[in-house]
Image (cartoon, rainbow, N blue to C red):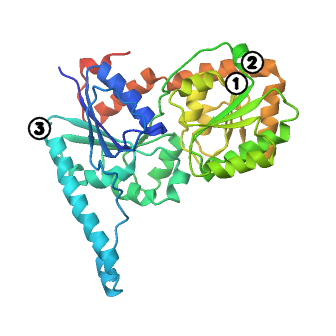
Amino acid sequence: MHGKNIVFVLNEYNGTGGAQRVASILAKDFVQDGHNVSVLSINEQVDKPNYFHKEIPIKVLHPSGYRATKPLRISSNLKALKFRKVKNELKRRYLLEKKRKEVVEFFNKYGTELVYVIVIQVYGMQWLEPLIYKSNVKMIGQSHESYEASKDSARFKRVLKYYRQIDKFLLLTNKDKLKFDKHGFINTGYIYNPSTFSQKTDPKKLFENRTIASSGRLVEGKGFDILIEAFARIADEIPQWKLNIYGDGPAKEDLLVLIEALGLKNRVFLKGEVNDMKSALTSSSIFVLTSRAEGLPMSLIEAQSCGLPCISTDCAPGIKEIIKEYESGYLSPIDDVHVISRHINRLVSNKDCYISFSEQAYKHSAIFEVSNIKQKWYQIFEEVGGLKDDASSKTV
């Protein structure tokens, strides 16, 4: 029996985000198990890395980088004589309809064969709407953020509109699943993101790196200003230690000003985006996440997979499913400079504690190994209508 047809739908197939890394590692393993995998990307980024294997076909709907605007009511804007808005809305509708037909053509190549569609971000659902009730298309939607982060965003309306209608809606934690159940969803489940790599390293060697690491897009919501301030509070007590922040974004200049103002330009470094995050982590000692809202952060999962003790703000239910507090890391209230700095100091000043946390971090990371997560995906495929085949039972 031939393998399953699996299509990943992403906002952009390329880039350094966690969504691309997760999808690419799953896609690679599905291919190795004999399945037919392809990618449907709404847009693409300029000069950004592509993690997908070169043999996996990628279709880009908008190679020009077009970004759909929010829908507008034509009648009210006509009455208000806002003709430019009306023109833009008509253009949006025309392009949406045109690209929907292109998407239908993309899926017609499968004929009547079952196709499992994994929608990584809800934004792409507006182009997939004509396929929702097609009998051979089994649609699985994901949300990579917590319920709390989602409900205050424009994405929440899309989730309520589209994800109620599909075969399965997957959250990152059981707590988030239960919260959507209260909104009347009857198709929810949850699945962890897999770690994109794993590296067992001697904790003593990691400690000797004397480096605190963090990563993510340089935006206000990631709280890097809090991390820098926390490091500043104890910098004189840990003179051999430095802080590396990996990522890029609009807050870069503000963070550089803060680093300069705190006299830390020789201790705190904005390293930019890196293609080899595994090497960056194995060259570090501790990972700190100071986000104000997250789902199930890939950065923490990857850090633990390299044996790094982690310190994180309690910014989502998923954090406690990654970090076992006082065993593999510490938690802090959001924006609490004092607590974060104390936690860093605890790990830096107590090598025995550090070694124990490092060993537990790596041990606990096993639940996020791709081989385990992949098998859960096969169970979901069977649940939504697939037939178990030989390829599904293989392990890497």
Looking at the picture, which amino acid does disc 2 mark?
Glu
Measured Cα–Cα span from mark 1 to mark 2: 7 Å
Residue ID for mark 3: 111
Q: Is residue 4 left or right of residue 28?
A: left
Measured Cα–Cα span from mark 3 to mark 2: 58 Å
Q: Which mark is residue 208?
A: 2
Q: 206 above or below 61?
A: above
Q: Is residue 20 left or right of residue 78?
A: right
Q: Residue furthest right?
A: 237
Position in image of residue 229 (x %, y %)? 77, 45
Q: Quadrant of residue 355?
A: top right
Look at the image and tell me whether residue 164 can be seen.
no
Structural crowding at the residue carrying mark 2, measured as other residues with C-alpha within 10 Å and reported as few (<14), some (14–19) or many (≥20): some
Provide the secondary structure element on which disc 1 rests: loop
Q: Is residue 93 left or right of residue 27?
A: left
Looking at the picture, which amino acid does disc 3 mark?
Gly
Where's the N terminus, which quadrant? top left
Looking at the picture, which amino acid does disc 1 mark?
Ser
Residue ID for mark 1: 285
Position in image of residue 381 (x %, y %)? 30, 32
Residue under the image location 18 percent in, 42 percent down:
107
Q: Quadrant of residue 58?
A: top left
Where's the C terminus, which quadrant? top left
| Tags 1 and 2 touching, CB below 8 Å | yes
Position in image of residue 219 (x %, y %)? 59, 50
